[in-house]
Image: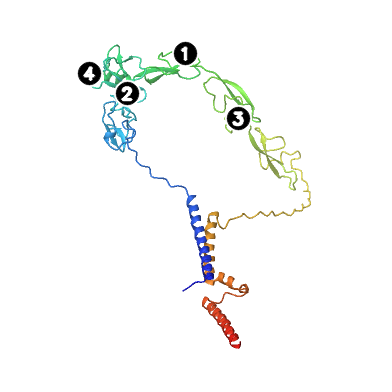
Amino acid sequence: MKFNSKQITIGVLIFLIVALGIFILIISTRISNSTQAPTSTKAGVITGKDAPGDAGQPCSSNLDCKTPANGAQSVCTGSICQNAICIGKTIPGANYDCSILNACGLGCSGAVGLCQAGSTCRYIDGPNCDNNPDASHPTNTICVPNNYPSLVTQNCTARDQGNSYVTVNGSNPTQTQLSQFCNPIITCYKCANATTNSCSPLTVNGSTCPSGSSSDPNGCGAASAGGSCISQITCYGCTDSKSNACTAKMINASTCPSGMSTDPNGCAATSAAGSCINQITCYKCTPIQTSGSQCDSFSATGSSCPSGSSTDPNGCAALARSGSCPVQQPIQQEPVPQQPVALISKPLPSTAIVSDKADPILLGILFILIGILTFKYNIIERIMNSDFKFIFTPFSLTLKEEKLKRKIIVDRKEFENKFKKEET
């Protein structure tokens, strides 16, 4: 089957329209994908080969963890270098120390854990600090209490010179002695109250009395901040119930009593009601009434109602001059015409039926539909072979009917040409 130039042109145009629609769809899809946020990649496990050795570093086997400086055994557990004795509680670093904190008086080391707050891990077999426990010192490093008066701290000399040891009266202490030093109990004395210099005993866990107290049963006054247990302060209370003014008063105590403040302007805030002003409800005669006993309520400051009013809701008439409220006829008032209410129209919010991202996709689909319709109804060929009368006629003829119609026209022309030749 041969195609003439006209048919080839029509086919090329239809192909270009469909191809343009497909191209627009592909481009819009790529633009939509490029605007999406990148997905996170799965983090790989970093082995300890880049920075091997110290506790807390990542590892894949025990060979990635070097020997700890404190002599403990290192292991690779959970892909992390740790101390085999305290897995999960290893302090990061070259020592592989354990973070298990031992109480004062207990043994301590980098392998079994250091000490709690208030004590420090020190040798008790100085000055050599030879790290060889014996019968009298089964554990030669003990959690020693800090700042205890009887303990003397010195640096080790023979080995481990970076650490220190303690002595008691020039001798190495035992673990039992240090345990007693960890929890000493003494009796101190503090002021019993702020009005006298009498002292009351105070039991203290420690070696010294706290600030403001004394080991002397009669020395609590001298040990207090002001040199005496008796203290006077200036407090401020409400002057009256009609204002928030404050009045100063000297108090023999360390704190102001309830309802008073050390702030010259703070008496109102510390009062029970949060204000010095006392609000009461009073009742007076209604200005316009017909019965002579109608009362109106109002608020007043102070402890009593002003003259001519009463705290009794029905007692205003009895306090009036004539024993009854004055009766007056109410004044008739003209009704006030109401102004029409102006209706303010608000513009409706603008909404987008199609988003910006969907416009290229719809445009591509539209071009594809145009190509399909052009091919189905042979629109381009109609345009090229017609005098544009097809615009005013419906597309009711099928392709087969169109071909038959053209064939009839061609046959008619051939018949006319043949008839003319015969006449001549």
Inspect the image, locate mark 2, and give the three-letter code of the amino acid beneath it. Cys
Q: Residue at x 59, y 33 (%)?
A: 274
Q: CA distance from mark 1 to mark 2?
A: 33 Å
Circles 4 and 3 in contact, beta carbons < 8 Å: no
Q: Residues within 10 Å of mark 2 (few under 14, many from 20)?
A: many
Compared with 13, 327 (above or below) is: above
Tell me where residue 290 appears, x and y as whole percent: 75, 48
Query: Which residue does the numbered mark 4 point to in the structure image?
Result: 136
Query: Which residue does the numbered mark 3 point to in the structure image?
Result: 268
Mark 4 vs 2, N-terminal side: 2
Between label 2 and label 3, give the one nearer the viewer: 2
Looking at this rendering, what residue extends furthest in the left direction?
135
In the image, 192 versus 382, the foreground residue is 382
Query: Which residue does the numbered mark 1 point to in the structure image?
Result: 222
Compared with 222, 83 (above or below) is: below
Q: Residue at x 63, y 55 (%)?
A: 348
Q: CA distance from mark 2 to mark 3?
A: 52 Å
Q: How many marks?
A: 4
In the image, 239 versus 311, the foreground residue is 239
